[in-house]
Image (tube, rainbow, N blue to C red):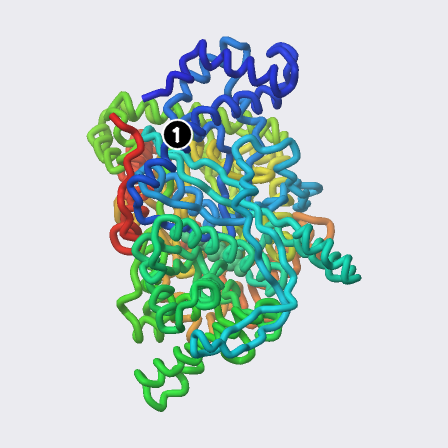
Amino acid sequence: MTNEMFKKEAFKKSVKDNVKFLYRKTIEEATQEQIFQAVSYSVKDVIIDNWLATQKAYDEQDPKIVYYMSMEFLMGRALGNNLINLCAYGEVKEALEELGFDLNCIEDQEPDPALGNGGLGRLAACFLDSLATLNYAAYGCGIRYHYGMFKQKIQNGYQIEVPDNWLKNGYPFELRRPEYAKEVHFGGYVRVEYDPEKGGNKFIHEGYQAVKAIPYDMPITGYDNDVVNTLRIWDAEPIVDFELDSFDKGDYKKAVEQENLARNIVEVLYPNDNHYAGKELRLKQQYFFVSASLQAAIAKYKKKHDDIHKLYEKVTFQMNDTHPTVAVAELMRILMDEEGLGWDEAWEVTRKSVAYTNHTIMSEALEKWPIELFSRLLPRVYQIIEEINRRFILEIQAKYPGNYEKIKKMAIIYDGQVKMAHLAIAAGYSVNGVARLHTEILKNQELKDFYEMMPEKFNNKTNGITQRRFLLHANPLLADWITEHIGPDWVTDLPQLKKLAVYADDEKALQEFMNIKFKNKERLAKYILEHNGVEVDPHSIFDVQVKRLHEYKRQLLNILHVIYLYNQIKMHPEMEFYPRTFIFGAKASAGYATAKKIIKLINSVADVVNNDTSINGKIKVVFIENYRVSNAEWIFAAADVSEQISTASKEASGTGNMKFMLNGAPTLGTMDGANVEIVEEVGAENAFIFGLSSDEVINYENNGGYDPNVIYNTDEEIRQVLMQLINGTFSNDTELFRDLYDSLLNTKNTDRADRYFILADFRSYADAQKRVEAAYRDEKGWAKKALLNTACSGKFTSDRTIQEYVDDIWHLDKVIVRKK
Ligand code: 26W
């Protein structure tokens, strides 16, 4: 059902008016960027009405609300997504055409808001889309970083990080709400005073620095239901009054400090993925947005309800990994110091209100703050954590009398550190992993002690993705084709795709399906030519690995295998070989030297291989610069093969794997994360599985690793590939890739050689790649596999994931906004 405003003539008039009001220009005079702004304001007009209607419905229906607390929201562009969800994409496209503009180019003007690193941030964005679409009341709570994920430039094969000033031209899809500002306090000390009224102690926080938190709201439109939820991200400003006060007292230093604190706090997103660096500013960011969000949530609750003891009946806080876990203690502080509850009452409310999702088992990702830092920055909050810890240890002792090992392993504060995961689990009423295998590993390995002590808290919620962005918007040709064949219901009910299975042997349907894939490959080839200057052949197999760069994700395995194939072709020019384009896209954390070196290696291999005329273009290697949500949409649509090759047990779930599957690309992968469930849905015959199992990997790890030198010494072809890293084949500087070579074979820079089992899995991977090639040669067989991947991807919608969170954890009520 489309809004009247989107009727062509009305919409054209609205855009023209906006151009006039905003820029004093006519349509003909306006730049593309100005048209983007004008169009966005026209769309926002409609959204605002729905937003108001949604608020009103919430006020009347008083549903339980989930606050999804996350340091990261990787939203991607909003214009196209909003048009899709408002069911106005087609009409607006036509209206703009009549004005002489191409909607695609207008969409391209929007900065790609990248307030997140990778999987965890994008998951948060998909969840917001599903929550709104399923009529649930939800707020995303986060930080309005002035600089999001850096822009990646590739210079001379190296990654260069360029700041991403996404707010430069003003962002049309946000609304500043200064009237809801909150104050957040850092530093200072706690004074204890006897309170005769209470008959107990009062804790007074003094001498702190204060920052004003200003909320900016972004609308989150549901699909075709008039719901508009809110992503509330907090900006920081110095508190002016206090500043004057300080000047009066001659406290110039403090005023300047407060000014700086506010300026620094929201400046930039930490570009680390799965790596904890222990930076004080990060803890400040965490407390800043958590405190402001909790204050706002409680204020909202109190507007309609007078008994704070029942907060958990109307409110629940989901902590996206440990990053917002300080929420546990901050909620206790607000309940006790501001609402006047006693410890037991406050604890009862807190433990029924907070839940925790774990997104990684990588030990280097665990957040542990030094006591010194924590207690200096958040003295009152730290006191509360000490008390939570004291009581938790008593519980452990009661359950395991005399077992000090347990205390050592499970305490929240131990060895001079505050362990955020332990705090989250001790306090939360739910602890979940993000794929079945991941949750099992948590229960049986990483969090075993906690699982044994409180099994009832643990549950699995396999991740999902939104088909509205990753099919309907990303792949309009396939979306239309699907709708022609099975109707439009899949847009909000993805398991409907199963109905496509009847076309698995229908030659005409298969041909159409693959024609669409070909057109999407042409679209990507054009993008690659424009952005990378490399010509790729859409008839070749598009073999794609796009994701953050991390050793455990094993981009190195992929590129070593490319080298191996290159050697094979050079050695046996007559050998049959189906042309292949290996496409990579990945950002490396700025401080992660090995990851950056792998990017350089990929580009160096690309230089040699792409320019070697003797191989007749049989292999092309492309590194797509600045991989992000907007170009990801095109990449998934164009992929033939989905590389999901992490060391088994390391990838909690993966969500890119689901986006490829949805767009008809079979998985080439290990039995890791959600790959396990993907194979279960599509059948092993429609995927290419290889490598050690997670049990095997964990077994090796528990027994000191394995010896890659045995492989090196006995497998000549692998040895040749490794030698080429250090013999000048890919760089005149023979030392350039020495560290990569070393990491695979000796323990010079790490405690174990080949930590990620690259050599162990190499042969099995090469073999799976052979099976891919053979399968691709069988055109019909491949088309069937591709189509069945799409048909069987229904489970992996974030709509299903969200419904499971609602049923098992949040218990939300549906809200109806549209009156039929
Ligand atoms: C403290 C630094 C830091 C930063 C980010 C530690 C950990 C993270 C995240 C947990 C990294 C992340 O994005 N994890 C990914 O979460 C996805 C959504 O659940 C999963 O699909 C991926 O497998 C997981 O790596």
Where residue 51 appears, as percent x and y from the top left, is: 41, 33
Q: Is residue 95 left or right of residue 17?
A: left
Residue at 60 percent of width and 63 percent of height: 277
Viewport quadrant of the C terminus? top left
Q: Is mark 1 within 8 Å of ligand 1?
A: no
Residue at 64 percent of width and 53 percent of height: 590
Residue at 57 percent of width and 38 percent of height: 624
Q: Which residue appears farthest toward the bottom when viewing the image?
A: 402
Q: Looking at this view, is 316 or 692 the one in front?
A: 316
Q: Looking at this view, is 114 or 478 the one in front?
A: 114
Q: Looking at this view, is 633 or 204 the one in front?
A: 204
Q: Looking at this view, is 73 or 65 the one in front?
A: 65
The answer, for residue 149, to whether it is visible in the render is: no
Q: Which residue appears farthest toward the front when viewing the image?
A: 197
Q: Across the whole image, how many numbered discs are drawn on residues?
A: 1
Q: Is residue 742 left or right of residue 451?
A: right
Classed neighbour count for the residue bearing mark 1: other residues with Cα under 10 Å, few (<14), some (14–19), many (≥20): many
Where residue 268 appears, as percent x and y from the top left, is: 63, 49
The answer, for residue 725, to whether it is visible in the render is: yes
* Disc 1 residue type (three-letter): Asn
Where residue 653 appears, as percent x and y from the top left, is: 39, 53
Where residue 581 appears, as percent x and y from the top left, is: 51, 36
Q: Which residue in the protein does label 1 denote?
A: 50
